[in-house]
Amino acid sequence: MTVSAKWTGALLLSGLLANVASAAGGPPLVTDDPDTPGDGHWEINLAAVTQRTVGWYVVALPDADINYGLGENLQLKADLPWTHARTGGEDWQAGAGFASYGVKWRFIDEDDAGFSVSTYPQYAHSMSGSSIRRGIAPAGAQFFLPVEVSAKVSDFDLDTEIGRNFVQDGASQWQAGFVVGHACHADLECLFEIHETYTEGSAAGRSSTQTLLNLGLNWKLTESLTLLAAAGREFGRQTPVQLQSLIYIGIQIVR
């Protein structure tokens, strides 16, 4: 595997694996929401996340997104993926992926103001030096500082998130997302997402804007078990890391 190929894979991974009340955001989508699990409650999302570009296939399997409610308005998060990556005709590489840890604080509640607002700082880094050397995960750390807002309008759940992603060994980004959720059935919520990433230019290349269009669903199987699924792709100027497909299939466990 060449050095340039390794960096292509690392950049891909850092893009979305860095990537769920009435709010519609969170897994299986990229855009998050102000919702928290509640005091003493767990929300665990176990998924397979597949990303494909011109030359790369990257699969997080399993992707373990573990969340715990510390009070009603705070959430602790650890996202720990085991990542598989392949480029060209080469063999699959597998190893510990790009982990992220965060604390969500909802400081405005929908019950009080008619809408919810939170902030969700997250720190991400590669869990293994071997994964970095083999191009499975990027070398530098990242820090994402967003704000989320959600509200309910008629029968629709609306969420938006905007934030700055500070990248240690690469170009930093602005990210913004918007989600619409609607109950298609008693236990089925249909989701539509637009998520835009603006990557700043550097000496190595021009700035780039990619727009992800995503369709998803949350299918509540039992009180504690929900099926999560989404599929989408990015549109914009073609780059080596532009997502030709993004697929999420998983199970959410709450207790």
Image (tube, rainbow, N blue to C red):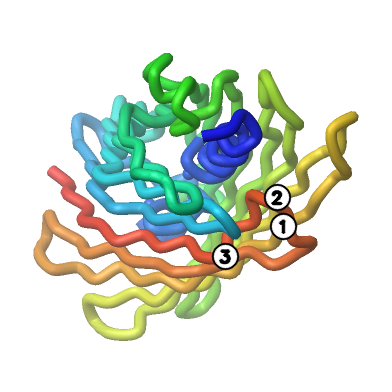
Image quarter of residue 167: top right
- Residue type beneath disc 3: Gln
- Residue type beneath disc 1: Gln
Identify whether 231 is placed above or below 130: below
Which residue is located at x 67 percent, y 51 percent? 240
Name the one closer to the observer, 171 or 227: 171
Which residue is located at x 54 percent, y 40 percent? 9
How crowded is the residue under tag 1: few (<14 C-alpha within 10 Å), some, or many (20+)? Answer: many
Label 2 and label 1: CA atoms lie apart by 5 Å
Name the one closer to the observer, 89 or 247: 89
Label 3 and label 1: CA atoms lie apart by 11 Å
Tell me, yes or no, if residue 193 can be seen here.
Answer: no
Identify whether 253 is placed above or below 151: above
Name the one closer to the observer, 57 or 146: 57
How crowded is the residue under tag 3: few (<14 C-alpha within 10 Å), some, or many (20+)? Answer: some
Identify whether 242 is placed above or below 9: below
Q: Which residue is mark 3?
A: 244
- Pair 3/1: label in front: 3
Which mark is first along the chain, 3 or 2? 2
- Pair 2/3: label in front: 3
Q: Which residue is mark 2?
A: 197
Which mark is first along the chain, 1 or 2? 2
- Residue type beneath disc 2: Thr
- Secondary structure under the numbered disc 2 in the rendered image: strand
Tell me, yes or no, if residue 133 can be seen here.
Answer: yes
Q: Which residue is mark 1?
A: 210
Image check: 236 left or right of 94? Answer: right
Instruction: Tell me whether the residue at label 2 lies in contact with that at label 1, contact meaning CB atoms closer than 8 angstroms.
Output: yes
